[in-house]
Image (cartoon, coloured by chain):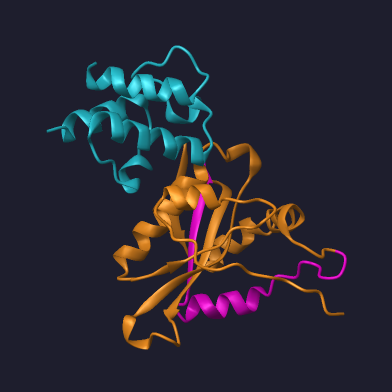
């Protein structure tokens, strides 16, 4: 049974290092031009500043998935308090039977507990979870475009 | 149809696993996230019981689903 919990970067990072490359290979675009290069120091700083929220999914202690988000007031809506913005999420393929739903339900509950008024997330066009988000009551708000410039 | 029968029927429509019993674990249903959420929505429609995502995410067995619907039915 997968269990979800909030973790700090210091405990999360040693375990996630083995998964990040798999996550990147499965989902990142332009892999020849833009290699994975996680800035662990930057994440540690965001964690220390209270901006980073990590939901870890573990099966018998082993990290099998995660959702990372940033919690901060949006510069357009300063008086509306912090908003939750997905940075990235991933579940190992062999643990995907419903884990994505539970991961997002846990994240949403945590945001509500912290008084967050609005959450913003996304899905890849080439691994599209739009139907799931719509079924969970999310509004389709934006489309994002990427262009390799050099 | 009784509430337990509704839950079993809707989950059986979503999953290929047979037979389903109260002790069948949700993860054994082999449903992806969307399939599970859609099955929950079908159970809501058929039973008239609202199932918040937060509660659905904590169902471990088919029996948990039945118990929730039973406890929250009018």
Expressed as whole percent of the image width and height from the top left, the position of residue B20 reads: 41, 16
**Who's the residue at 59% across and 75% down the image?**
A43
Q: Is residue A141 magenta?
A: no
Q: Eyeballing the image, is A117 above or below B1? A: below
Expressed as whole percent of the image width and height from the top left, the position of residue B70 reads: 19, 28
Q: How many numbered discs?
A: 0
Identify which residue, B32 or A18, lies in the foreground: B32
**Who's the residue at 53% across and 78% down the image?**
A46
- In the rendered image, is residue A96 in sight? yes
Q: Is residue A41 magenta?
A: yes
Q: Residue furthest left?
A: B74
- In the rendered image, is residue B23 in sight? no
Chain A: its colour in the image is orange
Task: From the viewer's perspective, tell me whether residue B19 is left or right of residue A68.
Answer: left
Q: Quadrant of residue A39?
A: bottom right
Task: From the viewer's perspective, tell me whether residue A42 is left or right of residue B70.
Answer: right
Q: Eyeballing the image, is A131 above or below B64? A: below
Identify which residue, A57 or A140, lies in the foreground: A140
Identify which residue, A64 or A103, lies in the foreground: A103
**Who's the residue at 66% across and 50% down the image?**
A127
Where does the magenta region start and end?
A: A32-60
Quarter of the C terminus of chain A within the rendering: bottom right
**Who's the residue at 45% across and 53% down the image?**
A104
Expressed as whole percent of the image width and height from the top left, the position of residue A136 reads: 41, 50
Chain B: its colour in the image is cyan
């Amino acid at each position: 049974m997968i269990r979800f919990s909030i973790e700090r970067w210091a405990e999360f990072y040693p375990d996630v290092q083995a998964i990040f490359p798999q996550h990147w290979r499965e989902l990142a675009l332009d892999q020849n031009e833009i290699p994975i290069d996680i800035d662990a120091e930057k994440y540690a700083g965001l964690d220390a500043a209270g901006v980073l929220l990590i939901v870890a999914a573990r099966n018998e202690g082993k990290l099998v998935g995660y959702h990372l988000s940033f919690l901060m007031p949006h510069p357009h809506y300063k008086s509306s308090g912090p908003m939750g913005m997905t940075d990235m999420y991933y579940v190992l393929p062999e643990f995907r039977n419903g884990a994505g739903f539970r991961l997002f339900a846990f994240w949403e509950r945590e945001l509500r507990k912290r008084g967050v008024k609005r959450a913003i997330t996304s899905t890849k066009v080439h691994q599209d979870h739009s139907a799931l988000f719509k079924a969970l009551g999310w509004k389709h708000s934006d489309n994002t475009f990427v262009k390799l410039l050099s | 149809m009784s509430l337990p029968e509704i839950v079993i029927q809707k989950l059986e429509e979503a999953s290929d696993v047979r037979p389903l019993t109260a002790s069948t674990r949700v993860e054994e249903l082999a449903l992806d996230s969307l399939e599970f959420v859609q099955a929950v929505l079908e159970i809501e429609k058929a039973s008239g019981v609202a199932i918040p995502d937060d509660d659905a995410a904590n169902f471990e067995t088919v029996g948990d689903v039945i118990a929730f619907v039973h406890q929250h039915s009018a």
